[in-house]
């Protein structure tokens, strides 16, 4: 019996938001993931061949759902092959969700799916290869040059545009659910590409999704999501705010080497953000490695955006499109206040906050925060001549 085939129509990436520049194609109800015209179906043997038999020398990353290998197609294009763990049905579930979602996305700031492979025992995804590792690597890696301010601003704007596309121009909208610096890949020009949609969820505009299992990375997760599993697009906004704090401060989202009470980047930064905006002095919160070499106007815009994103009250956080517009002078001006006056933090609006953040902190320290899905962690020791010695990152 011939398998059904389905054409996937990709919405073009608009230059401004909103309105939408065309809906994303609705999910297919077929179990035959044979995409015509845009995506390629690979055999398992083909992927074995292009990765050197999934050689450890070609492994460029490892995460909770599997390993990532570098390979090259017959036309010379480098790709990243994600070999998903299979077992208990979870691997298949994540595979099908990821293929269904990513195949319908096309944007310069989102990693592109090239193809896939599915057999009884293997499920693999083939992505474009993004050559310059991750934002996490460049901000927190040992012995690397300090990332200058123009690059940080460029990455913030690019990743905000990609996430805005997911939230505003995909119908139904796509919530990423695991935004972090390790999932922002960089090309050689330091253009940002948001990766890892394996945890993404499609939600209807009128629906607040309550997940049966909370998934994400502690240190980035919105308190309401960490404590209750309630998921909205504003959960992504909170996580992106933590990424902005990393760009501003150079600090990790959770760092147990910091003094007691300052381990959480969000908690440490909250009062400093308010002070910086009230005094127009950013020296206390800016990454000391920058040595004050930044545009004060741009720094203020990023600090304002970060402060708005990490508000404890979900309804007081801006939409992603507002965040993008506030960062990008070409995106048009926008108001991030949402009724919140400067100096009046919404962090303590809820009596549940202390319990939420304590759970948030405790679970964060129990998690392994140094593992990276793409690229290498700081602790990796590479054998001489290994393909992993290249400072590269894989677009899943």
Image: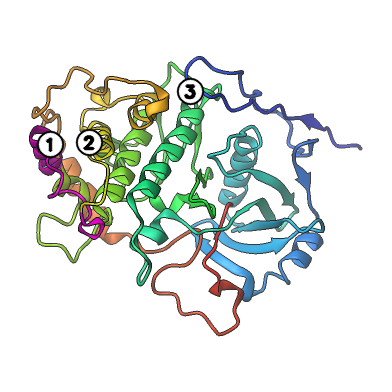
Q: Which residue is mark 2?
A: 300
Depth check: give the residue in front, 253 or 215: 253
- Residue at 61% x, 19% y is 23
N-term mark: 2 or 3: 3
Q: Is residue 138 left or right of residue 53?
A: left
With respect to residue 59, does 187 lie above or below? above
Q: Name the side, left or right, on which 22 lies relative to 361.
A: right
* Mark 2 neighbour class, 10 Å CA radius: few under 14, some 14 to 19, many 20 or more: some
Reading the image, the residue beneath label 3 is 168
Instruction: Specify which label sits upstream in the sequence, 3 or 1.
Output: 3
The image shows residue 171 at horizontal and vertical percentages of: 56, 21
Q: Is mark 1 in CB contact (under 8 Å) with mark 2?
A: yes
Q: Which residues are magenta?
A: 270-291
**Viewer-nearest of labels 2 and 3?**
2
Viewer can see residue 198 = yes
The answer to whether residue 219 is visible is no
Alpha carbon separation for disc pair 3 and 1: 32 Å
**Towards the viewer: 317 or 301:** 301
Q: Residue at x 18, y 17 (%)?
A: 339
């Amino acid at each position: 019996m011939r398998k059904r085939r389905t054409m996937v129509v990709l919405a073009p990436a608009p230059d401004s938001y909103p309105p939408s520049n065309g809906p994303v194609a609705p999910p297919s109800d077929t179990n035959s993931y044979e995409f015509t015209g845009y995506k390629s179906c690979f055999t398992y043997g083909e992927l074995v061949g292009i990765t050197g038999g999934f050689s450890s020398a070609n492994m460029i990353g490892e995460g909770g759902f599997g390993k990532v290998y570098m390979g090259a197609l017959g036309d010379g294009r480098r790709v990243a092959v994600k070999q998903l763990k299979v077992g208990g049905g979870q691997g298949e579930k994540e595979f099908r969700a990821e293929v269904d979602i990513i195949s319908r996305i096309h944007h310069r700031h989102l990693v592109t799916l090239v193809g896939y492979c599915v057999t009884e025992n293997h499920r693999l995804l083939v992505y474009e290869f993004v050559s310059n590792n991750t934002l996490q690597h460049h901000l927190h890696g040992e012995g690397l040059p300090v990332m200058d301010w123009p690059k940080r601003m460029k990455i913030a704007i690019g990743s905000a545009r990609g996430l805005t596309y997911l939230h505003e121009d995909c119908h139904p909208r796509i919530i990423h659910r695991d935004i972090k610096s390790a999932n922002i890949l960089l090309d050689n020009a330091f253009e940002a590409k948001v990766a890892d949609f394996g945890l993404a969820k499609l939600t209807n505009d009128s629906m607040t999704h309550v997940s049966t299992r909370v998934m994400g990375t502690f240190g980035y997760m919105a308190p309401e999501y960490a404590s209750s599993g309630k998921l909205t697009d504003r959960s992504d906004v909170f996580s992106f705010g933590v990424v902005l704090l990393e760009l501003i401060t150079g600090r990790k989202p959770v760092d147990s080497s910091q003094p007691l009470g300052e381990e959480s980047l969000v908690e440490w930064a909250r009062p400093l953000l308010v002070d910086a905006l009230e005094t127009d002095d950013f020296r206390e919160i800016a990454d000391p490695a920058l040595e004050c070499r930044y545009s004060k106007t741009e720094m203020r815009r990023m600090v304002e955006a970060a402060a708005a994103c990490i508000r404890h009250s979900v309804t007081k956080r801006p939409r992603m499109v507002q965040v993008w517009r506030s960062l990008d002078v070409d995106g048009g001006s926008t108001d991030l206040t949402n009724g919140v006056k400067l100096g009046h933090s919404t962090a303590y609006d809820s009596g549940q906050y202390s319990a939420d953040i304590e759970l948030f902190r405790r679970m964060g320290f129990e998690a392994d925060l140094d593992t990276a899905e793409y690229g290498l962690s700081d602790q990796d020791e590479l054998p001489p001549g290994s393909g992993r010695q290249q400072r590269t990152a894989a677009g899943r």
